[in-house]
Image: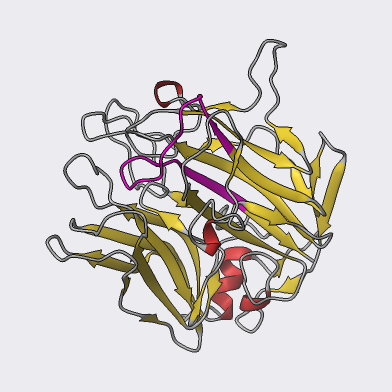
Amino acid sequence: MVNVNALHKYGILSEYTHAAGVAQAVNTVERGAVTYFGDDEAFQIDKIEIFPPVAPMPFPIENILVQLVLDGDAIDLIFLDSRMATPYATGTPPFKPSCYLFGDRKSTNPLENFCMKGRKSLQIRTMALLGGVAITSSYYVRISGDWFKTDDALRNHFGPTFNPVPVTVEDGVRDRRVTIYRPLPINLDNWLNLSGGCHRSAKPRVLPWINFCRNALDTTPNTEYTLDLRPGNVTYEWENMHWDLDNKTYMINDYVGVWPDEAGQHLRTAWWEYGGVEYPQPIIPTGVPRWDTRFNFNELPPGMPPHSGILNFHGPRPVDRKLLGTNEIMEARIMDDGTAVHHTAADHVFFAQWSRKIEF
């Protein structure tokens, strides 16, 4: 017999609008209305879109932090800037969306489906960033995904089991691999305990890990600058790009984006270090190791144009080799071209990473 109450829809789960002309001061938090869900309902987040606040030059994109509050918990895994989840591209077709997608919403593989999952409520939280300027323009944030009503709706979409077979991710460069296998029947009772996208679930689990940072100090010419909280090189704790990973935590970097200092244009390179070894490495002997991030030659555009006069959008760069960080120190670094990069609101470096974290 068909369960007529087994409903499944895809669409907007939550949204928030900040009106033009209403100032949002630096470090001021705003919250959207809470979307509540019933006892026989569940949801998963597929994408987040940010229609950013655009102001007159010299601050074309006003910087806001966007976070999720999921089932009453502020999620400490996802920190988005105005430039990281732009919903559409403009300019010459074909247009390419660059909003952030949380994997494959139809998959039962936790390495592919790490969509954040919830049962009770969803809310959008924003903040104007320290080191930036007060928000004066309008912006709109939209979260989309799947809504399910009853166990049958979940099973109709996914099938009977999540993570039904072992799945392995391999780092062929360094001969590392890790396998995730924690099968569970798909139903409402298990929905928050699946191995993909559930922030309170048992381990092993796979979660999105996304953040960004800006340099909080001037760089020292021709000297490596670590994007590390401890020496005060970044401002907020969640901006820290220095990770001391234990042997039960694995990190896979999927995308990277860098916005060079727009006013001075003195950023030269950016890179990661895994256990003291740099990535990327040059292909040709005369090549410069690290990514080229000079303003007019940037290999890592994060998603937004440099100013309103240029209308070509890019998405973040996919990482070519999926290195698997574990039981080591990982960190992101930058270096100038011999002239210091400043840290003012108009002239700083923006570094963003989109990753997956596997926890045991």
- Which quarter of the image is occupied by the N terminus? bottom right
Q: Give percent across and percent down for residue 287.
A: 65, 14
Q: Give percent across and percent down for residue 64.
A: 34, 58
Q: Residue furthest bottom?
A: 39
Say if the magenta span includes residue 214.
no
Residue in front for this viewpoint, 183 or 21? 21
Q: Give percent across and percent down for residue 162.
A: 70, 66
Is the residue 44 above or below the residue 315 in the image? below
Colour scheme of the picture: secondary structure
- Residue drawn where x is 64% and y is 77% of the image: 200
Is the residue 134 above or below the residue 291 in the image? below
- Residue drawn where x is 31% and y is 70% of the image: 28
Q: Which residue lies furthest to the right in this view?
A: 175
Q: Which residue lies furthest to the front in this view?
A: 220
Q: 7 left or right of 190?
A: left
Instruction: Specify whether residue 9 is in view.
Output: no
Stretch of the chain drawn in magenta: 334-355
